[in-house]
Amino acid sequence: MDFSFNLNRTANVSAWRVLPNRWDFVAFPLIICLIAMAAVGFHETMAPISTLKTQAISLDPTNLPEYALRTTLRMLAAMVASLIFTLVYGTLAAKSRRAAQVLVPILDILQSVPVLGYISFTVTFFLALFPSRVLGAELAAIFAIFTSQAWNMTFSFYQSLRTVPRDLDEVSKGFHLTNWQRFWKLEVPFSMPGLIWNMMMSMSGGWFFVVASEAITVGNNTITLPGIGAYLAQAITEKNLHAVGWVILAMIVVILAYDQLLFRPLVAWADKFRMENTSSGDAPESWLLDLVRRTHLIHQLLVPLGWFFAKAARVPFRLPFAMPSFPVVQRAAPAKAGRGGLRAKLGDAIWAVFVIALTLYVVWRVVAYVRTGVTLDEVGHVLVLGLITLLRVTLLIAIASVIWVPLGVLIGLRPALAEKIQPLAQFLAAFPANLLFPVFVIVIVRFHLNPDIWLSPLIVLGTQWYILFNVIAGASAYPNDYREAAKNFHIRGSQWWRQAILPGIFPYYITGAITASGGAWNASIVAEFVQWGDTKVAAHGLGAYIAQTTAAGDYPKIILGIAVMSLFVTLFNRVLWRPLYTYAESRLRLD
């Protein structure tokens, strides 16, 4: 038999697969554009800080492409930082019982601290790191955007890790996977659909506070970075409706771009991680993902990267976590006896004393600082303002839940519909409340309306989308096996909602509601105090109080407002959301 022909043929086929095809020539320009965009952004960040003062923000629409590029790069940098934070922080909180006692409450507090609160105390720090470069101001803006993205993603990942199905948990134990292997082979894939939808929500949430991150004013310090947010802030100051219209157009273009180039491919790629035995027959698609798969040269260049990550996931590392991870709510185990049990109890007691002591120390330092510029009457006044904002937030979350849970289920169970709705939902979620300031201010002043009522709808922009995106994620991850079983047993109508779909999406809804609560409190700072030119309209509430004291640079009152907001959010989560979260973990799991 002549083997030479077969060898030559195999060699020719391998060489042909490396040579670029027509799809490579389509994909290469996209890659070159992305590299050029990153290079230009890096060059701008290394410019002298003096350029920010000499180059004022211009409302000329021809500058918007450059501004859009700068804003997009900041949001992508913040997204990468948020993803790293999510994987590390969410894993520690879910796997270590003692760490969870600290990390979960801290996460509640972090999501309740408004973006303006972070900006007030971080601008000086980042500027001091790079005093002569724009990079310091860029890092401050990126960190501000990070604070509007990271908490939502972390809660989603934490929720997924806590609700890994028991059968998959037993399979991983049967294969004797280490913590490291289990993390990459089971837990990350299981959490991927929900995490990607929350990444979309987080990216949109970053747009909501892009004005605060790019046009920073704290007391006498003003830092303005070129970007869509700074452009919008300047348009609001000058009452330029034409410029506001150009901002809306630029946002539409940018959101469509990163939807098609980033999130649509991720959603299509993550569909393979759905937990089911039967196919839905209607999987999400992405032209970009199909394009990359059809290329020869680019596909071959990506093979070594995929091989590296696959090998890294199989390395048998044993991570030193305090407890086996999931599920946390398990059947009662026999009590530990002897020296091991006593050592564990002693360790828990020491850890509890340490946490309480640290908490008391932080509270003492905060109270000592706030007392320098705040009276006891002021504290009582701020608590009343907090109750007013709490009432607004609770009412709006209830309204948003009634509207968006059914619609989210409808969208999530239909991938083809989700593909069409996804860009629109991202745009609406990214729509900054600042763009509606002209309408609300003009109407309220013209008709002498009550700001306490008519400014409240602005908070919805920072509330409803967390619920919608998480419900879509839950419905998208709902196993097709269960849908087929419900159809075969003729479960329909209200019974289907009560016994099939609502239990399946409930953990996702709780995650969305928790982050919606924090998002609404943050949105209250923008929504309760609005400005259009020289005209200012304020509602009674904690958000307006923080916005006004931040503009005045009154740090003791800023800290008081942030502390009260964190207190309300934490208590609300502990009294309502956390018990529901525990119920979802123990009773409503897709096992």
Image (cartoon, helix red, strand yellow):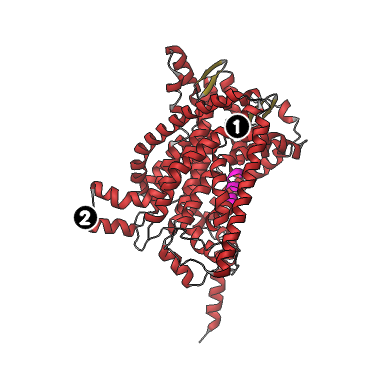
Q: Nearer the viewer, mark 2 or mark 1?
A: 1
Q: Which of 185 and 579 is in front in this view?
A: 579
Q: Where is residue 321 in the image (x, y as percent from the top left)?
A: 58, 62
Quickly name the residue at label 1. 116
How many numbered markers are drawn? 2
Q: Position of residue 126 (x, y in %)?
A: 71, 38
Quadrant housing residue 317: bottom right
Quickly name the residue at label 2. 490
Q: Do the residues labelled 2 and 1 touch (CB within 8 Å)?
A: no
Which of the image's four quarters has the C terminus?
Answer: bottom left
The segment highlighted magenta reads 77-86
Query: What is the crowding at mark 2: few (fewer than 14 residues within 10 Å), some, or many (at least 20)?
Result: few
Residue 67 among magenta residues? no
State the residue at coordinates (45%, 21%). 452
Residue 140 visible somewhere in the drawing: yes
Q: Indicate the amino acid at tag 2.
A: His
Residue 18 visible somewhere in the drawing: no
State the residue at coordinates (57%, 68%). 340
Vertical relation: 524 (above or below) 202: above
Q: Which mark is residue 130?
A: none
